[in-house]
Image (cartoon, rainbow, N blue to C red):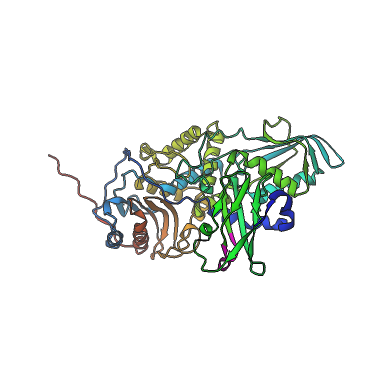
C-alpha cells in the first residue's frame, strides 16, 4: 500500500464533473442515529384525551413490547375544530427530528420561501498577468449548502476574474454566527460522524471528507479518491481487495483517521461491494476550511503565496457573490433527509436575521416568540434547545405539534412546507415505509429511545388529516409498526374515539 498527497494527485484522478455526484451521500450522512430522552416539563394548555388508542395501534405496540403510555398521539381533520384522537396529547416528550418542523415552518414564514444566502467575495488588491497582489476575502452568512461542488464553482469564479496566483492570503470572515464551542463527540461520542458537525457562518462541505472506493479486480486493489482535496493531508491511494460478501465493509477497512495529517486504511475492501462512498467528519475541524480551500485552489492550478486565515471582510462592495438555492429548495433536504447540520444553520440564520445575533440564544428567542404567535398558550411549556432536535433536552407535545400543523395548513407557505416532507413509501426517510404509500407526507424523528412522525395523511374520503405520534421508550424502535398503524387508521376515516369523561365534582 502506498500513500500520496491528495492535493497533488487529485487532478489525475477525477474530472471536475465528479464533484456534482457526491452531495446525496453526504446529505444522508448528516442524519443522526438514536439518542435518548430526558426529564419532562409540563405544558400549560390542557387537552381532553380520548379513552384509548385504536386497536390496531394497541396491538402493534403490544407486539413490540412497548407500553401504551409510552406513546403520545394526535389525529385531526385539517378543517375540524377538535381532534379525532388525542392520546396523552399534552404530555411533553422528546420530539427528536420533529423539531425540524418548527424550524422550517418558522423560517418559511419569517424569511420567505425565496430567501437565499449570499457568500460575498472580494478580490482585494490589483490583478495583472493572472496575479492578484492582495487578499482573496470570503464572507460567510450561514449558507446551509456550501458543499463541494459550490466551493469548486466559487474558486472557478475567482479564476474567471483573471486570477491564477494569489500573492497574499485567503481571508475568511465567519463573524455572522457565534455558535459557541462544540466538541463533536459531546452528543454520542462519535466525533467522526458528519451529523455531529457544528454550525458555522462559513460551513464548507459540512467539514466532511468523502472517500470513494472503486474496485479494480485486475490489479487486486480498490482505488481511493478523497473529496475535497485537503492540503497537507495524505491518504492511502489503494487498499487490497478481498473476497466474501459485502457486509461490514467499513469495519473491514480498519480505518485510522485520528491523525489530521494522515488517513490510513490498514484492512481490505470486499470486491463484491462495488463502488462505495464513505462520508466522514475530518479529525481536525478547526483546520478544515484552511486545508479544503488551499487544496481546491491548488487542484485547479492556482498558486497561493500566503495562508488561509480568519479575518474581517472589507466594507467595500464585493467583487462577486455566490448565491445559495432558495429556502424552499433547501428545506427539502432538511425535512426529507432529516439533515441536522442544515437545520442548525437555518436556526442560527433566524437568530442573525430576526433576532440581531447569530447565536443559539437569539435563535431560541425568535422561535419561541414565533411559536407563541402561532399556537398561543400551547407554546408556553415547549423546550427548544436547537433547530434540529439532535439533543436530549428538547420537549414538545403532540397537541402543540397538531395545532402547529393545522396552522401550517391554512398558511400561505403550506405548499412549500408539505412538499418538503417525506412521502410514505416514496422518498426521504420514509422511502421504506409500508403504511399508506404515496398518501402520507410525514416528518420522521428518530433518536435512541425515540421514534415519531408528524404531518398529513390523505384519507379514503379525500379528507386530509393531521397525524402526530411519538414514542419515548427504551424499546421505541419496535414501535415503528404502531406509527404506521396510526397513519392507516387515519386514512380509513374511522370514527373519532370517545373522549375521557370529566371527573365528577366532589
Q: Which residue shows up at 20% across the image and 49% down it?
A: 501
User: Which quarter of the figure has residue 241?
Assistant: bottom right
Q: Residue furthest right?
A: 129
Question: Which image quarter is the C terminus in?
Answer: top left
Could you tell me residue 113's position as x and y percent? Answer: 57, 47
Q: Is residue 258 left or right of residue 474?
A: right
Question: Which image quarter is the N terminus in?
Answer: bottom right
Q: Nearer the viewer, residue 100 or 115?
A: 100
Q: Nearer the viewer, residue 155 or 229?
A: 229
User: Which quarter of the figure has residue 368?
Assistant: top left
Could you tell me residue 206's position as x and y percent? Answer: 58, 46
Q: Is residue 49 left or right of residue 488?
A: left
Q: How many marks?
A: 0
Q: Which residues are magenta?
A: 269-276
Q: Which residue shows up at 76% across the image and 44% down it?
A: 158
Q: Based on the picture, tell me whether residue 274 belongs to the magenta stretch.
A: yes
Could you tell me residue 128's position as x and y percent? Answer: 86, 39
Q: Is residue 23 above or below residue 349?
A: below
- The reply to whether residue 14 is in sight is no
Q: Nearer the viewer, residue 65 or 468?
A: 65
Q: Residue furthest left?
A: 506
Q: Based on the picture, tell me whether residue 356 belongs to the magenta stretch.
A: no
Q: Nearer the viewer, residue 503 or 344?
A: 344
- The reply to whether residue 338 is in sight is yes
Amino acid at each position: 500500500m502506498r500513500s500520496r498527497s491528495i492535493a497533488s494527485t487529485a487532478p489525475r484522478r477525477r474530472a471536475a464533473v465528479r464533484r456534482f455526484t457526491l452531495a446525496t451521500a453526504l446529505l444522508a450522512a448528516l442524519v443522526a442515529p438514536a439518542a435518548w430522552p430526558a426529564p419532562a416539563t409540563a405544558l400549560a394548555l390542557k387537552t381532553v384525551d380520548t379513552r384509548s388508542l385504536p386497536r390496531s395501534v394497541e396491538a402493534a405496540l403490544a407486539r413490540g413490547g412497548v407500553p401504551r403510555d409510552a406513546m403520545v398521539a394526535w389525529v385531526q381533520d385539517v378543517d375540524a375544530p377538535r381532534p379525532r384522537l388525542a392520546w396523552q396529547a399534552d404530555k411533553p416528550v422528546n420530539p427528536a427530528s420533529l423539531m425540524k418542523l418548527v424550524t422550517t415552518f418558522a423560517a418559511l414564514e419569517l424569511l420567505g420561501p425565496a430567501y437565499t444566502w449570499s457568500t460575498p467575495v472580494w478580490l482585494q488588491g490589483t490583478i495583472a498577468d493572472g496575479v492578484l497582489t492582495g487578499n482573496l476575502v470570503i464572507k460567510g452568512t450561514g449558507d446551509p449548502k456550501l458543499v463541494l461542488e459550490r466551493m469548486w464553482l466559487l474558486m472557478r469564479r475567482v479564476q474567471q476574474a483573471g486570477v491564477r496566483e494569489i500573492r497574499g492570503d485567503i481571508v475568511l470572515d465567519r463573524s455572522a454566527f457565534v455558535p459557541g464551542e462544540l466538541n463533536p463527540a459531546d452528543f454520542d461520542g462519535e466525533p467522526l460522524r458528519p451529523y455531529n458537525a457544528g454550525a458555522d457562518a462559513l460551513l464548507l462541505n459540512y467539514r466532511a471528507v468523502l472517500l470513494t472506493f472503486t474496485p479494480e479486480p485486475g490489479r487486486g486493489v480498490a482505488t481511493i479518491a478523497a473529496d475535497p482535496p485537503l492540503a497537507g493531508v495524505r491518504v492511502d491511494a489503494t487498499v487490497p481487495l478481498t473476497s466474501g460478501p459485502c457486509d461490514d465493509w467499513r469495519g473491514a477497512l480498519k480505518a485510522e483517521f485520528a491523525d489530521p495529517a494522515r488517513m490510513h486504511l490498514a484492512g481490505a475492501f470486499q470486491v463484491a461491494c462495488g463502488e462505495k462512498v464513505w462520508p466522514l467528519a475530518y479529525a481536525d475541524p478547526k483546520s478544515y476550511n484552511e486545508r479544503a480551500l488551499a487544496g481546491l485552489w491548488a487542484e485547479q492550478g492556482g498558486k497561493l503565496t500566503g495562508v488561509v486565515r480568519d479575518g474581517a471582510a472589507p466594507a467595500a462592495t464585493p467583487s462577486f457573490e455566490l448565491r445559495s438555492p432558495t429556502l424552499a429548495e433547501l428545506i427539502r433536504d432538511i425535512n426529507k433527509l432529516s439533515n441536522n447540520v442544515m437545520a442548525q444553520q437555518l436556526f442560527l440564520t433566524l437568530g442573525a436575521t430576526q433576532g440581531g445575533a447569530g447565536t443559539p440564544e437569539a435563535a431560541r428567542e425568535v422561535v419561541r416568540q414565533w411559536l407563541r404567535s402561532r399556537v398561543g398558550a400551547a407554546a408556553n411549556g415547549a423546550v427548544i434547545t436547537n433547530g434540529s432536535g439532535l439533543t436530549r433536552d428538547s420537549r414538545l407535545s403532540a397537541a402543540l405539534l397538531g395545532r402547529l400543523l393545522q396552522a401550517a395548513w391554512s398558511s400561505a407557505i403550506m405548499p412549500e412546507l408539505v412538499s418538503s416532507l417525506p412521502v410514505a413509501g416514496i422518498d426521504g426517510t420514509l422511502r421504506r415505509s409500508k403504511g399508506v404509500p404515496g398518501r402520507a407526507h410525514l416528518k420522521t424523528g428518530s433518536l435512541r429511545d425515540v421514534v415519531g412522525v408528524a404531518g398529513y395523511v390523505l384519507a379514503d374520503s379525500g379528507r386530509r388529516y393531521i397525524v402526530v405520534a411519538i414514542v419515548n421508550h427504551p424499546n421505541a424502535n419496535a414501535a415503528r409498526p404502531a406509527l404506521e398503524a396510526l397513519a392507516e387508521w387515519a386514512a380509513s376515516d374511522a370514527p373519532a374515539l370517545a373522549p375521557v369523561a370529566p371527573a365528577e365534582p366532589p
